Image (cartoon, grey):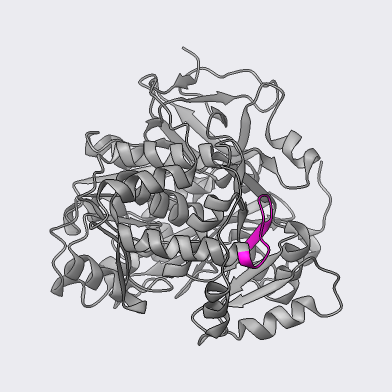
Amino acid sequence: MKSYARGPDCVLIEKTIDQVFRGTAARDPGHEALLSRHQAIRLSYGELSEEVSRTAAGLWGLGIRPGDRVGMWAYSCAEWVYLQLATARIGAVLVNVNPNYRADDLRYILDRSRMKAIFLHEKDNRVDYRDVLDQARDGAELPLAHAVLLETSSWDEMIAAGERPTSPEPDPNDVVNIQYTSGTTGNPKGVMLTHRNLLNNAYLVGSLMHWSAEDRLCLAVPMYHCFGCVMGSLACMVFGATLVMPSAVFNPAAVIETIDRERCTTIYGVPTMFIAELEHPKFPEHDMSSLRTGIMAGAPCPVELMKRIVSEMHCAEMTIAYGQTEASPVITQSSTTDSLAERVSTVGRVLPETEVKIIDRETGETVEAGAQGELCTRGYLVMKGYDQDPEGTARAIDAEGWLHTGDLATMREDGYFRITGRLKEMIIRGGENIYPREIEEFLHRHPKVADVYVVGLPDERLGEKVLAWVRVLPGETATEEEIRDYCRGRIAHFKIPEYIRFVDEFPMTVTGKVQKFIIREREIEMRKLAGVAQTETA
């Protein structure tokens, strides 16, 4: 049997985001749509519809027209949703801008995206965004015509000067969103996504969780990532569910309090977020019994952590999803009816109307079930391409429409997938191929380990050696030898970390992904391995 699977047939949504939102709001205008706790904003679907209409008029008054790019450079807030829906209504393209970007990063995005307007907060306790924007614009010839400050007179003036939009109805296949990949290697690429891409991914993901209008999502993940603005806000709009934002940025205390106070049924997060919630000192004080389902994604999901979420957070129907921005984002997901063993050891099966195959990187042939190779996907979910990068698009999407993810995976004969690593993360030690994910999952079972990430460090003799950054549970201590003793006799000797460092935190992207290249760079510098790292190899 070959490693190929196609999800079940279903009827896809052939509408625009605005058409779906208008229909949802018309069906039950009094139902609660959006709650931003940190802003003290609580809106029904009818009230949200009015805010979207005002925002769309404001954009039109600024001169924003179909196809124009509009940047949102902010953490999670109600205005994020207003702009997401308003740009979709008038045919503009929303550009997600990472709030951690500083002047050089921002200048690159402003130039690359050709955005005509950008929305931002003036400042917060992390940075003065207005100052960063001024630095980014200094001396640069950019098409940016408007910078609108959220929650200030600048926003109010835009709304007051609004004009009734007269744009024709967008097409479902139009680009509606550009999201820049995290940029952990090289410059970020602008992923162009359509109404059809995003709505159907949101619909299928929500369907697998058996969502209805009665569901209430505690959105702990950021809006500026696919996890938040597709699986989060758009899924809520499709099903008429309630979107609850506990805080602007991830705050485990706010998350567990929000679940309790707002009786949320669904929780999203990456592994590090769930760990922070479970380990928070006030976790035992809050009632999690309203939770039913959710998604853990965005990074490898440790088996032991998943078990704790099911038992301690009462999320009996917790799922794992796998995907990437270029796939809108979800490719595979476990089902709420899957056994615990299937949910904790795989990333589920392929979504409806989606194809997946595992190929041999050298030959391009589909491998046999159980064999490792690169995961490729095809279907409605594949991006339109990288913005202004036809060469990059051609490298990512082949002539037959298959998106090459760069992720290593295996497929069981029953159609369940397991992600085994990234091609670029593979460690080659003395001719042995080592996949960090395998070691990370093993060390997660150590009774003192809270979180762990593994990378390869250059070695003159072996090519690479294994390094593990380990964070132990609060109140615990451990030694390097203790960790190695735990490994001896239980995993192959060449997988046992030669280097171990105990840390309190990991370098992260704002979307919760650990930046392994930074771990590697820091260790090369601290261990004075720069000379070895620069040695050319075949």
User: Foreground residue, 524 or 360?
Assistant: 360
Q: Quadrant of residue 526?
A: bottom right
176 to the left or right of 329 = right
Q: Quadrant of the C terminus?
A: top right
Q: Quadrant of residue 346?
A: top left
Measured as percent of width and height from the top left, residue 417 is found at 42, 31
The magenta segment: 61-70
User: Foreground residue, 411 or 318?
Assistant: 318
Whether residue 434 appears in magenta in the rendering, the answer is no
Is the residue 133 above or below the residue 377 in the image?
A: below
Identity of the residue drawn at 63% across and 24% down: 360
Tally the numbered discs.
Answer: 0
Identity of the residue drawn at 40% across and 71% down: 250
Q: Residue furthest top?
A: 1
Measured as percent of width and height from the top left, residue 367 is found at 56, 19
Measured as percent of width and height from the top left, residue 5 is found at 46, 20
Q: Main secondary structure of the magenta part?
A: loop
Identity of the residue drawn at 68% across and 81% down: 132
Measured as percent of width and height from the top left, residue 376 is found at 58, 30
Instruction: Please say whether residue 97 is visible from this viewpoint.
Output: no
Instruction: Please say whether residue 148 is visible from this viewpoint.
Output: yes
325 to the left or right of 11 = right
